[in-house]
Image (spheres, rainbow, N blue to C red):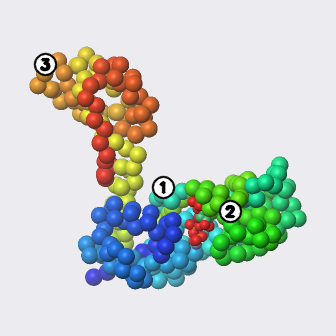
Amino acid sequence: MSRLKIAIQKSGRLNEASLSILRECGIIIPNGTGKLIAESSNFPIDILFLRDDDIPQYVHQKVADLGIVGENVLFESRKQVLMLKKLGIAKCRLSLAIPKDIPYNSIHFFSGKTIATSYPFMLRAWLDQYKVEAQIEEISGSVEIVPGLGLAAGICDIVSSGSTLFSNGLKEVELVMKSEAVLIGTENIEAAKKTLLQQLLFRIDAVLSAKGKKYILLNTPNDKIDAIIQILPGMKSPTILPLAEKGWSSLHSVIDEDQFWDHIDELKKAGAEGILVVPIEKMIQ
Ligand code: PRP
Ligand code: ZN
């Protein structure tokens, strides 16, 4: 029987995020074996643990059918692969940063200076766009220590929480691109694997749809039902069930979590009681 092969990051920010989205899809993956490949016991998929920078290449060469990488790594690699889905996880940005005590006015700060980066292709394209002539020093790791060593005026690197920049005395001065994790694949995948891929994509959609959504249950006097539905515009067609207490109903619906916090006071004022907001694991549209 066919099995899918998916390449994910061996260690780093994307490793945990990738494993957790696969697990949320109900895929059992053995824990911390330290092996290069882990086989799921309940879905025909094998997980390959690789350096994230190598993932587009492995997918391009069909060593893996699928991969999870940051858009930053994908675009920098310039490998011909299909971007199947944005995953909304591991969000970060590719930014320029300089030592925090150095004054910065504009992008022309970088004219004639050296910038260290692991993303020379994207940095060059961005500098060209603004017609800034700077020297690019390609470095494969620990880029953040370079300005402190006096080897470059600044860096162009991934910023997520910002703690790496902070602990190296750097400040972010320009945004080059925003990035998030994406699922990549190859064209002409064999039929049996394609069926498995459809199943996996279906599960991923169910997991992504549920993110940021909550199931809300509340009790309301019957004459307030319309007002309450107005307050929560996302609540298109709520389920309304009569309560044992006469003249009262229980109203159930799916809402955006943000929307809930914005409208909680109005809901209470309108007469809602016993409000419950519960997480949703999967949502099939
Ligand atoms: C990036 C970047 C920093 C870190 C920044 O590496 O190179 O090391 O993340 O994150 P922070 O703002 O939360 O401190 P990445 O995770 O892309 O992994 P890499 O080792 O493959 O470059
Ligand atoms: Zn990397």
Foreground disc of the pair 2, 3: 2
Q: Which mark is residue 168?
A: 2
The amino acid beneath tag 3 is Lys
On screen, residue 234 versus residue 67, left or right, reads: left
Q: Secondary structure at mark 2?
A: loop
x and y percentages locating residue 273 in the rendered image? 27, 25
Report helix, strand or loop for mark 3.
Answer: loop
Task: State the separation of the CA atoms marked 3 and 1.
Answer: 45 Å
Spatial CA distance of label 2 from label 3 is: 65 Å
Q: Real-space Cα distance between discs 1 and 2?
A: 28 Å
- 143 lies above or below 58: above
The residue beneath circle 1 is 88
Residue under the image location 76 percent in, 67 percent down:
148
Q: Is residue 91 visible?
A: yes
Q: Which mark is residue 13?
A: none
Q: Assess mark 2: CB under 8 A from ligand 1? A: no
Query: If you read the primary sequence from the N terminus, does the residue marked by circle 1 or circle 2 appear first?
Result: 1
Q: Secondary structure at mark 1?
A: loop
Q: Nearer the viewer, residue 118 or 222?
A: 118
Q: Amino acid at mark 2?
A: Asn
Name which residue lies at 87% across and 61% down: 111
Disc 2 vs disc 3: Cβ atoms closer than 8 Å?
no
Disc 1 crowd rating (10 Å Cα; few below 14, some 14-19, many 20+) is: few
Q: Residue at x 23, y 19 (%)?
A: 221
Disc 1 residue type (three-letter): Gly
Query: Where is residue 54, by image quadrant?
Result: bottom right
Q: Which residue is mark 3?
A: 246
Q: Is residue 50 above or below residue 154?
A: below
Image point 48% across, 58% down: which residue? Answer: 89
